[in-house]
């Protein structure tokens, strides 16, 4: 079984969304220091690296990460590639027949940004028109290849509000650099963090 890991490794090189807690693996116990074992403490944002957004991210009464449907997080997924270097619009998506699709992963130039430890604020986000298009076309899970589905500093966060408000699962921070467009089986398993607005996830694809 050949699996493609589309997860960004969490290390000191993973970029952090501005204002969020940087990832850190803190040594609490170390064999090298004479301790009985190695034990670390994790310091990280709920939106560190590859992660899911829960509706709670933008809606106080929305479900937390533990309520995201595993049935929706795993299953047939379509990967499409867009060459636009601006925000993704409904027009960019209109050329794709998505009638068979409920899970859609969008590969862009963003996947080339991984490896740069400094947050890149010119990443490609999803505009409100595209978010509406996705909801109207029955997409229930959307994956993007940088740290936010939203264009950077977009007032009122229309993409998040439209998608999360419709119950669409949002996966952010995928590395799709080595993934060809096509149909795959998706396995996305976020940590079950109760009440969390997001949760880190391991995400892999299997060619179907
Ligand atoms: Zn997020």
Image: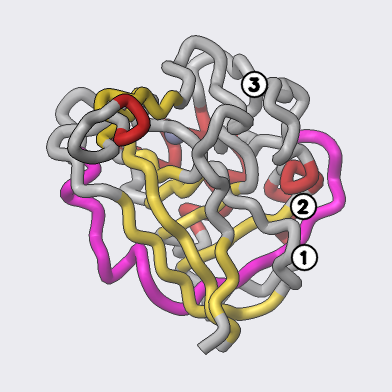
Number of marks present in the image shown: 3
Mark 3 or mark 2, which is nearer the start of the sequence? 2
Please indicate whether residue 62 sits to the left or right of residue 118 in the image: left
- x and y percent of residue 151 in the render? 64, 27
The residues bearing labels 2 and 1 have C-alpha atoms spaced at a distance of: 7 Å
Q: Is residue 48 left or right of residue 90?
A: left
Q: Secondary structure at mark 3?
A: loop
**Could you give the CA–CA distance between mark 3 and mark 1, rounded to whole angstroms?**
25 Å
Q: Is residue 156 magenta?
A: no
Q: From which residue to which does the magenta span run? A: 64-87
Outermost residue, top side: 19
163 w.r.t. 143: above or below: above
Residue indicated by mark 3:
152
Assess whether mark 1 and mark 2 are in contact (beta carbons under 8 angstroms).
yes
For residue 92, the mark is 2
Name the foreground residue: 73 vs 99: 73
- Label 3 near label 2: C-beta < 8 Å? no
Q: Residue at x 45, y 33 (%)?
A: 48
Residue at label 1?
Answer: 95
């Amino acid at each position: 079984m050949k699996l493609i890991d589309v997860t960004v490794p969490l290390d000191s090189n993973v970029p952090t969304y501005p204002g969020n807690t940087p990832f850190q693996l803190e040594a609490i116990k170390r064999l090298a220091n004479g301790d009985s074992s190695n034990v670390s403490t994790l310091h990280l944002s709920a939106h560190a690296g590859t992660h899911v957004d829960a509706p709670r991210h933008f809606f106080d009464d929305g479900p937390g990460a533990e309520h995201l449907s595993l049935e929706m997080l795993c299953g047939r997924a379509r990967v499409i590639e867009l060459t636009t270097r601006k925000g993704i619009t409904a027009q960019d998506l209109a050329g794709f027949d998505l009638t068979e699709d409920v899970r859609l992963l969008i590969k862009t130039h963003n996947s080339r940004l991984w490896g740069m430890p400094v947050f890149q604020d010119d990443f490609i986000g999803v505009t409100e028109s595209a978010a509406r298009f996705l909801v109207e076309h029955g997409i229930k899970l959307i994956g993007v290849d940088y740290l936010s589905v939203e264009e950077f500093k977009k007032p009122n966060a229309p993409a998040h509000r439209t998608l999360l408000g419709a119950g669409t699962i949002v996966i952010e921070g995928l590395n799709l650099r080595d993934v060809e467009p096509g149909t795959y089986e998706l396995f996305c398993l976020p940590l079950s963090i109760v009440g969390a607005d997001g949760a880190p996830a391991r995400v892999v694809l299997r060619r179907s």
